[in-house]
């Protein structure tokens, strides 16, 4: 990559870090309600993986989705406004943190039910294969998701039909507060793929260059019909599972140890500075622009209106209240014959 490309990787990781810190702050101020799952510590996975995709590939994630949305180029204004539940949010303020999506970027979100998005991602990959579009699907999930039924059913089907899909397992060592060794029979998660004859490997998820290289390589193979691939990225989330359980019980020494492998610091020191791709001044300039962008996203979201009350029942498939039409008028009960 040239200097501009490397600085862009840095900018995106820094944007995610600052955005996540700010959204935690806004949650504390009750500007954001519901759930909020942060990507802090996992920035290299989001940026490395997404930067290796083509613009028209399909991207599907679980609820820990802000980092992927920002890396995919969704605007920080629209993402923050979605967290605020406002009209200018990516899904009109209806989904919130767990349901960021933008069809124009083929970013399909943002799923709250663990494992539920895997069959949908396989469906997107099947559509690409059937229609010969040359697209691939990247389906991200957490380590905990690899214990759930849909994981096994989807891997089986994807391998059987040689679907053009990459299963990206973000192994951050915990499923909510439960450590990997307590929730999974195999702690080398990539080995689960062997049960389906699927190719797989592990990568250092705190190394953005390694992440990017792995996904570039795998994407090239998957695109030419080699079948699905499971990539396990080893990383760590600094925050608890979500904003309501900020403090996942774990040894302080463990968090400190992972902080020494911080993906942004590591990229800065071992790539940008070491090989003279950037000066401290270059990075200060980027940091300032990122901070201004995130601050602007908050101002924008605060000014954005709430979704109109009259649209409350839009996009809902069932009449929400017995005997009531969508517009609120009462359904006349049938006249009974005597
Ligand atoms: C089917 C289902 N079961 C349980 C939950 C509650 N739940 C939400 S996230 C989560 C843990 C998932 O952990 P992991 O896949 O490792 O992802 P991480 O949050 O660490 O990124 C659980 C059990 C859920 N949302 N859906
Ligand atoms: Mg996890």
Image: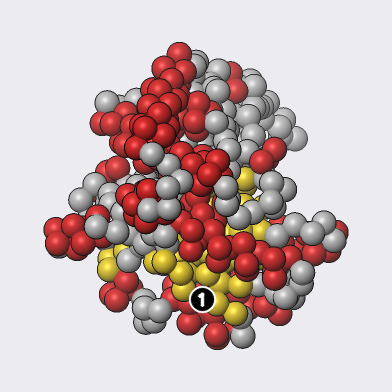
Q: In the image, 116: left or right of 259? A: right
Which residue is nearer to you in this view: 275 or 152? 275
- Element marked by disc 1: strand
Residue nearer the viewer, 85 or 256: 256
Residue drawn at point x = 62 percent, y = 62 percent: 216
Residue at the far right in the pictured view: 131
| In this view, 44 is above or below 323 | below
Residue in view at x 46 percent, y 69 percent: 203
Where residue 275 appears, as percent x and y from the top left, is 43, 53
Q: Nearer the viewer, residue 264 or 162?
A: 264
The residue that label 1 is drawn on is 201
Q: Residues within 10 Å of mark 1 (few under 14, many from 20)?
A: some
The residue drawn where x is 52% and y is 69% is 231
Residue 260 makes an appearance in the image:
yes
Determine if the C-beta at disc 1 is less than 8 A from ligand 2. Answer: no
Place residue 18 in its image quadrant: top left
Percent coordinates x, y for residue 139 in the rendering:
58, 59
- Please state, as top left, top right, bottom left or bottom right, where the C terminus lies in the image: top right
- The residue lying at 70 percent from left, 60 percent from top is 136
Locate residue 215, reporting x and y percent: 58, 63
**Residue found farthest to the front:** 276
């Amino acid at each position: 990559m040239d200097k501009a490309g490397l600085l862009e990787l840095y900018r995106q990781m820094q944007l995610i870090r600052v955005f996540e810190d700010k959204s935690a702050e806004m949650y504390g101020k009750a500007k954001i309600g519901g759930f909020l799952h942060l990507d802090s510590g996992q920035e290299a996975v989001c940026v490395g993986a997404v930067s290796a995709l083509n613009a028209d590939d399909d991207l599907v994630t679980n609820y820990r989705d802000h980092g992927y949305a920002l890396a995919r180029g969704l605007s920080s204004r629209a993402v923050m406004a979605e967290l605020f539940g406002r009209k200018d949010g990516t899904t009109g303020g209806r989904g919130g943190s767990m349901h960021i999506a933008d069809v124009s970027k083929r970013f399909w979100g943002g799923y709250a039910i663990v494992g539920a998005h895997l069959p949908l991602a396989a469906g997107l990959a099947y559509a690409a294969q059937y229609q010969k579009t040359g697209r691939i699907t990247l389906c991200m999930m957490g380590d905990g998701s690899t214990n759930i039924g849909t994981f096994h059913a989807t891997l089986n089907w994807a391998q059987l039909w040689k679907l053009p899909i990459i299963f990206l397992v973000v192994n951050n060592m915990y499923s909510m507060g439960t450590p990997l060794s307590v929730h999974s029979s195999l702690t080398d998660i990539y080995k689960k793929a062997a049960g389906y004859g699927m190719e797989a490997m592990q990568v250092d998820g705190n190394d953005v260059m390694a992440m990017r290289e792995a996904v570039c390589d795998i994407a090239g193979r998957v695109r030419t019909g080699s079948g699905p691939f499971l990539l396990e990225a080893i990383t760590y989330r600094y925050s608890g599972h979500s904003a309501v359980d900020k403090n996942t019980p774990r040894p302080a020494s463990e968090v400190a140890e992972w902080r020494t492998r911080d993906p942004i610091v590591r990229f800065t020191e071992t790539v940008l500075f070491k090989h003279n791709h950037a000066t401290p001044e270059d990075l200060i300039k980027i940091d300032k622009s990122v901070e201004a962008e995130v601050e602007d996203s908050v101002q924008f979201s605060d000014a954005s209106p709430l979704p109109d009350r009259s649209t409350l029942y839009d996009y809902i498939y069932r009449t929400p209240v017995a005997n009531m039409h969508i517009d609120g008028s009462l359904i006349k009960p049938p006249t009974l014959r005597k």
